[in-house]
Image (tube, rainbow, N blue to C red):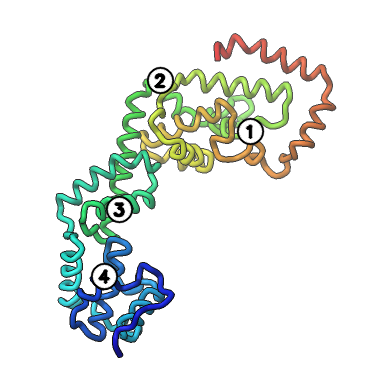
Amino acid sequence: MGDQAGEDIDDRWTLRASDRVLLGNKTGTTRLGFAVLLKMFQAEGRFPSRSQEVPVAAVEAIARQIGVPAAAWHSYDWRSRAIAYHRAQIRNALGFREATLDDAAALADWLESQVSALEHRSDRLLVAARERCRSLGIEPPSPDRLDRLVRSVVRRHEETLYAAVLTRLPAETAAGLDALLKAPTADATSGEVGRAPLLPLRAGSGQASLQSVGEEADKLARIRALALPADLFAEVPSKVLLAYRRRVAAEELHELRRHPAVLRLTLLAAFLPCARTRDYRCLGRSPDRHRPPHRRQSREEGRKRTDRRPQACCRQAGAAVQTRRGKLGPA
């Protein structure tokens, strides 16, 4: 069966005249295997590491063009010397070369400079790494090696970030952050154990009342007393901060305590500006969604209840804010 021109074929799998020249006098399984490797490398800038990575539609489209049964693809020997020769031939024809240890080190350095721009996301860094190799005419490392390289770069970058945050935190601030995770000792008279200060900071303010105004004032006073540097996370992407804040909002206290100090303090410091402003958009949610279902209410219902509240309660709440203003200090 001779070579056939493909009709209605995805352009990525269409064999050009130059491709057919590379096929030479190869036949059968060897011909199909070489053609598939060639088109995959042209499309993605890398060779597949196993046959299952190649779309069935791609194999069938290429097989039709060269007159070889698509089933022959499963007979292509991935451990043979022939496949190593085919890869070398394709690299030479397309102007690529294998990556060296120096290339891997240079790629790691380049990725380090891209971590913040790509929001610490391994998936985006993997794509960027492949595109970088392609632009330099280098065959990228194997998927497993590249994945390990990217994760190592992200981990190293974040460890550097955690260490930088820790160096900027005064000792008193660091101690105050850790104290947020510790419950007060049991009361000698009542025997009741207090709650860790972080728990009310993570909770919502609840229904507006004189008591809730006082509680919110106490929370704000505690946060301001920690004296966090205003620009502590100025260079950190907002989506990375969002991930840190969500982590603090979701993890149990014992999980937070178990983290190394550099990570624990970074997470807590990233969360507190959200608690201070009570702006739950920084957690990617509305102010009402953090509440238990039985306490949720529609905005309209809340507005109606507020309209019915006696004016005296509002005056008392305002007076409470004025009384505590000296405690809070300037905003």
> Which residue in the protein does label 2 denote?
172
Who's the residue at 35% across and 23% down the image? 168
Q: Nearer the viewer, residue 93 or 173?
A: 93
> Which residue in the protein does label 1 denote?
204
Percent from the top left, x then y, of residue 196? 54, 32
> Which residue in the protein does label 3 denote?
131
Q: Is residue 211 left or right of residue 327?
A: right
Looking at the image, tell me whether mark 4 or mark 3 is earlier in sequence order: 4
The image shows residue 163, relative to residue 330, as above or below, that is: below
Who's the residue at 39% across and 47% down the image? 121
Quarter assignment of residue 214: top right
Q: Residues within 10 Å of mark 2 (few under 14, many from 20)?
A: few
Q: Nearer the viewer, residue 326 or 101?
A: 101
From mark 3 to mark 1, how far is it between C-alphas?
45 Å
Find numbered disc 3 in the image and state the secondary structure of the residue it sits on. Answer: helix
Instruction: Give the residue type at disc 4.
Output: Leu
Quarter assignment of residue 304: top right
